[in-house]
Amino acid sequence: MGYWRAGFDVYGVDLLERPRYPFHFLRADAVAAFHATCQDFDLIHTSPPCQASCTLTKGTNRGRLYTDLIPVVREVCAWYGVPYVIENVTGAAVRKDLTLCGEMFALGVIRHRHFEIGWHGAPPLARPAHRKHRGPVRGWRHGVYRDGPYVAAYGKGGGKATVREMQQAMDITWTDIHEELTEAIPPAYTQYIGRQFITTGQWGASYEPDPARRLAAHARPQAALPRTLLARAA
């Protein structure tokens, strides 16, 4: 949704069916989709599963093995020379070219996420001010209940946010599926990144697609809109 708000024509890819996804959608393996279609897009945004890096998963799912797909998607995007963004959690092996927090956008979640920016003009120079958090995340922690201005948009029980609370806190209205909300990032994040990419600002001014790709863009429908492929590389 954030890229759409920034002016992109959005295509989504996931291994699972997502009937509530509001844009073009392809159910497929994301890496295979990259190989087949990535050169048709102006920007690739991928969110590999975070279980291999997530602190919560490391503690509660000890002994399980999770595949780290970050190196794979980075290599594929680099091979085809397509501008990309890789998003993931603290602890993931992504370059932290940009870190965004819900407080930067006056949201009801903290939800720190790191972004590796793979286009000309990176690393980024402009970013929202990372303001001091206004208090703790509301809920139970180690047997103590804390009240605060942010909701816990993950898991269930222990004071975690309800579906409605997560929708309101992250400004997400197109799904009411708990699992989809806990894995989502606020659209304000990708709206910010998308605007940086397509404007003449800090990053966009340095991005010039090669002549062949520019001609191809003018030959396709809705050529005025940059196209982005959003994928959960699962």
Image (spheres, rainbow, N blue to C red):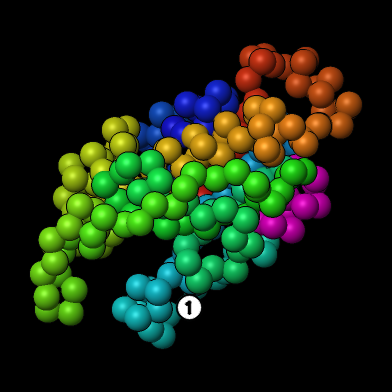
6 or 30: which is nearer to us?
6
Left or right of residue 151: residue 172: right
- Check residue 164 for magenta coloring: no
**Can the viewer see residue 11?**
no
Dividing the picture into quadrants, the one containing residue 51 is bottom left
Answer with the quarter of the image where residue 219 lies.
top right
Residue 80 within the segment the image draws in magenta: yes
Secondary structure character of the magenta stretch overall: helix
The answer to whether one can see residue 136 in this image is yes
Residue 49 x/y as whole percent: 48, 60
Q: In the picture, which quadrant includes the N terminus?
A: top left
In the picture of the structure, the residue carrying the numbered disc 1 is 65
The vertical placement of 69 against 76, above or below, is: below
**Would residue 47 appear left or right of 16 to someone viewing this image?**
right
- Specify the farthest residue to the bottom: 63
Q: Residues within 10 Å of mark 1 (few under 14, many from 20)?
A: few
What range is drawn magenta here?
73-82
Is 67 above or below relative to 127?
below
Q: How far across and down, in percent of the image, does residue 28 sit?
A: 55, 45
Specify the quadrant of the image occupied by residue 176.
top left
For residue 101, above or below residue 25: below
At x 81%, y 52%, the residue is 79
Measured along the vertical axis of the image, is residue 223 above or below residue 26? above
Tally the numbered discs. Answer: 1
Q: Position of residue 80 (x, y in %)?
A: 80, 46
Q: Residue 186, image x and y in percent?
A: 39, 43
Q: Residue at x 69, y 28 (%)?
A: 200
Q: Is residue 118 left or right of residue 68?
A: right
Three-letter amino acid code at disc 1? Leu
Looking at the image, which residue is at 74% across and 58% down?
A: 75
Tell me the SS state at disc 1: loop
